[in-house]
Image (tube, rainbow, N blue to C red):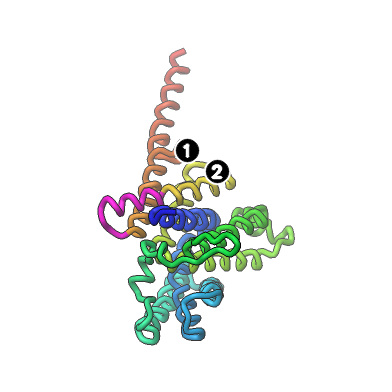
Amino acid sequence: MTYVAWILITASLVGMSCGMIGVFLVLRRMAMMADAISHTVLLGIVLAFMVTHSLEGVHMLIGAALAGLLTTYLVQWFQSKGVQYDASIGVVFTSLFAIGVILVSTSIGNTHLDIKHTLMGEIAFIPWNTVTLPFIGFEVPVATLTLFCVFLLVLGLILAFYKEWKLTAFDPALAASLGLPVVGLHYLFMTLVSLTTVASFDAVGAILVVAMLITPAASAYLWTERLSVMLLLSALFGVVSSIAGYYIAVWLDTSVSGSMAFSTGIVFVISFIFSPTHGVISKWIRPQNVQKTTLSKSTN
């Protein structure tokens, strides 16, 4: 398979995984938690490296997941003590990310995990780090294989807990009254967010992860009010943004991850303007039609 194809496949896997998870973040009004977790997982990655002295392995996922859970717990703890939700996110996000940046700059400065790599990723180098699949003998980039496994995990958990997460997203009080483990489901979901974030972290960087977690879901929200359709549209918008962003990067000779993040914004603007229910044009046309109907009835 060609060099370009692996980049597009990898980015599309990020777009689908983050896009589907982002729907529940948007519905729960927790979009900024995506920004917080996508940065604070850096602390988990750094601490895992300091213990194992390796940037590869399951310990990275474990460290990132624990950092994501720590972020979630601290935000909720501060909120329970009277601190506003957005302020809690700001305090926890900046503090934990700053600790991670300090450790990267001081304790592990000789590794390739630097600040630029953390923010922008190295998606252009993905095809060069491959692994041979057993029994098949086919070489696949490590990042692509990892993200494919994460996508299957995301899809499997969403299908398994679709009704529960749907109910807790729209009416957590009702879910609790029905006996659902709301807190447990919440932390399971945030663990999934953390795992998806760190799996995407090395390949595409924090900027694209945040863009894919929030913007495709926000775009899909403008097109439909059905959760199942919203999940499909968000995943589709993630793929479209990945492909369009790559060719924009080639055209402008600029950052691939940055261009993909920019493409998510283009998709959102198009949705914001042309959405049949919430779009600017439809909102402008609807009063015009109502006015014409009223005038026609009054004339008759």
Q: Which residue is mark 1?
A: 277
Q: Position of residue 20 (x, y in %)?
A: 53, 54
Toward the viewer: 165 or 124? 124
Q: How many marks?
A: 2
Q: Mark 1 is on which residue type?
A: Thr
The crowd level at tag 1 (other Cα within 10 Å; few <14, some 14-19, many 20+) is some
Give left or right: position of 136 versus 106.
Answer: right
Residue 195 image label: none
**The magenta segment:** 241-255
**Extreme top residue here?**
300
- Position of residue 256 in the picture relative to residue 44 (left or right): left
Quadrant the N terminus occupies: bottom left
User: Mark 2 — residue?
Assistant: 225
Residue 242 among magenta residues: yes
Residue 90: x percent and y percent?
Answer: 42, 71
Q: Is any atom of residue 79 visible in this view?
A: no
Using the image as rendered, state which of residue 158 and residue 181 is in the foreground. 158
Residue 279 location, quadrant: top left
Q: Position of residue 190 (x, y in %)?
A: 56, 66
N-term-proximal mark, 1 vs 2 = 2
Tell me the element at label 2: loop
Q: Main secondary structure of the magenta part?
A: helix
Residue 276, relative to residue 125: is it above or below?
above
Q: Is residue 82 above or below residue 282?
A: below
Q: Is residue 15 left or right of residue 269?
A: right
Q: Is residue 130 magenta?
A: no
Residue drawn at (41%, 76%), measured in percent from left and top? 97
Task: Name the residue at 67% across, 53% down.
Answer: 163
Considering depth in this image, is 273 or 112 the residue closer to the camera?
112
Residue that extends furthest to the left in the rendered view of this protein: 252
- What residue lies at 41% left-to-right and 62% top-to-bottom? 127
